[in-house]
Image: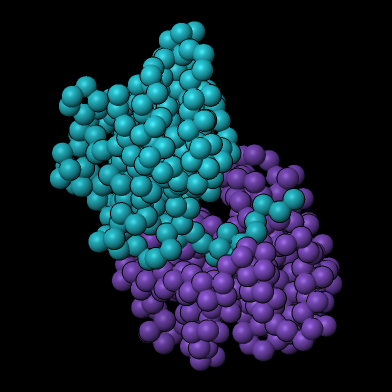
Chain colours: A cyan, B purple
Amino acid sequence: MSVYKSLFDIIGPVMVGPSSSHTAGAVRIGLVARSIFGMTPEEVRIVLFGSFAHTYQGHGTDLALISGLLGLPTSSEKIRQAYDMAEEANMKVTIETSDEPTEHANTVDLYLKSSGGHSLSLRGVSLGGGTIDITRIDGFDIHLSGENPAILVFYKDQPGIITQVTGVLSKADINISNMEVSRTAKGERALMLLATDGEIPPQAMEDIGRISQIYQVIALGALNVEPDLIVDSETKEEYSYGPQITRDN
Amino acid sequence: MVHRLQEIINLCEQEGIALHEYFLRTEVEELGQSEEDVLLHMEQNLSVMERAAIQGIEGVKSRSGMTGGDAKLLADYLHSGNALSGSIYTRAMVYATAVNEVNAAMGVICATPTAGSSGTLPGVLFAIRNHHKMTRREQINFLITAAGCGIVIGNQASISGAEGGCQAEVGSAAAISAAATVEACGGTPSQSGHALAIALKNLLGLSCDPVAGLVEVPCIKRNTAGVVIAISSAEMSLAGVKSRIPVDEVIDAMGKIGRMMPVALKETALGGLAQTETGLKMAKQLEESGYIDVESISVQKE
């Protein structure tokens, strides 16, 4: 079994120190949260668990999460100035720690809010080496690594929706690599997560959005595992999430 | 890449090619990357290491307050002309400390192979490149050889402190640096293998016991000491000294020791230096105030 395949698994990645799990992984959780939220949130509540809660100050886990929420890459030197940048971006941040036990040592809950009733809650886990897993979105249990493009579909649980969504993707010649469905209760609000091999074309997003009983569709690009250029604050967008389209019904 | 390191060494010697040529070819063939892209990417990583080294020598401070400034002390010491161990060793120590201090201070680094062990390899490379007047391409070759050997170690044993202790991090970093140094100095692939084995043997059993769970104490100084092990192992091998235990068996031993090691010594801060009287005081102060005032805790004990 070969875990390491590329030369750049050893000489790389380029990242902000000091820890791939407590810093780089935290940036990526923030990036995915930002991407799902679709904008810079006005209010953020961060609740840290386990090792995150005990060592976040020394590892800059708080700075890393805030930077991710602001769209900065894991290799940005500006991560150290995260609080100042949050202030500039009018993002209000509160940090809390909890000693409630969690399944994984490095766990964080994020609660994002913006005016107009826009809100999102999300649980992220840093698995090590910068690899992450988003395990909960708005109360739905799910697994999202950010490594592949994906679409999130919020809909009313009823027969036929999944077929219609996958039908649109099939028509657009998009291969689904992984699929998960989670619901609050039978016939209630549900979340479908489809990881795909390619980016979702805008037309397919339109078509999915038009399916009745679908509340919201969010397309996520793949998180860049590694920047291919040395960080430059001027070009930061290059490293953050890929194209993102949200369609609300 | 599933080969044992000795198989790769034999193959290189049969074909009359250098290790970096084999590893570059494999990267291109197995990952479908163009040679140009691989070299460019490696050069970018090299630039990141250079920037980190410069930043560290200027002097940085970690967020916890526990570390920083030692690279500057070492650089001043080097320039004083009183260094006992000569220009290459002391220079390597300066750069290794600098890069790992930058890592602790949340600066941008290139993992080699991890963030916690990001100082040793650039330390060795930057010290020998001046001495050997290595071209940019030769420096990239150094990185490729080190990376290729690291792939083998990672797959055969471990490069993670949580899995194998510090021997898997700084131990691996020193080992791959030694192998690449031998090649850069004109040694054979076999000699690179012996250097890797000797370096790794000298760091077997090293625990990962970071104070307060932070990648600072003792990580930075272990990166510094790692360069000395790397260069001395390369010197031994270049002189014709051979490892009595074959390289792959040494790598396997490292993996096995890592699995035998108690969890308390694998990045959990539950044992070793993390649980010393001073280590615990530092952890307590960090938890209470978010900052460690090393002066108040008395560093003389370190």
Q: Position of residue B111 (x, y in %)?
A: 50, 60
Q: Residue at x 45, y 60 (%)?
A: A14
Residue at x 35%, y 34% (from the top left corner): A206
> Along the line of sight, which residue is nearer the eye, B202 or A90?
A90
Image vertical order of residue B93 relative to residue A206, above or below: below
- Please give left or right for residue B298 compared with residue A70 in the image: right
Q: Residue furthest front?
A: A171
What x and y, as percent, mark residue B119?
Answer: 49, 66
**Which of the pair A187/A25 is nearer the observer?**
A187
Residue at 60% across / 50% down in the picture?
Answer: B161
How many discs mark residues in the rendered view?
Answer: 0
Residue A114 is left or right of residue B125, and the answer is left
Q: Is residue B262 above or below residue B96?
A: above
Residue A156 drawn at (x, y percent)? 41, 15
Extreme residue in the top direction: A186
Q: Name the quarter where the N terminus of chain B is drawn.
A: bottom right
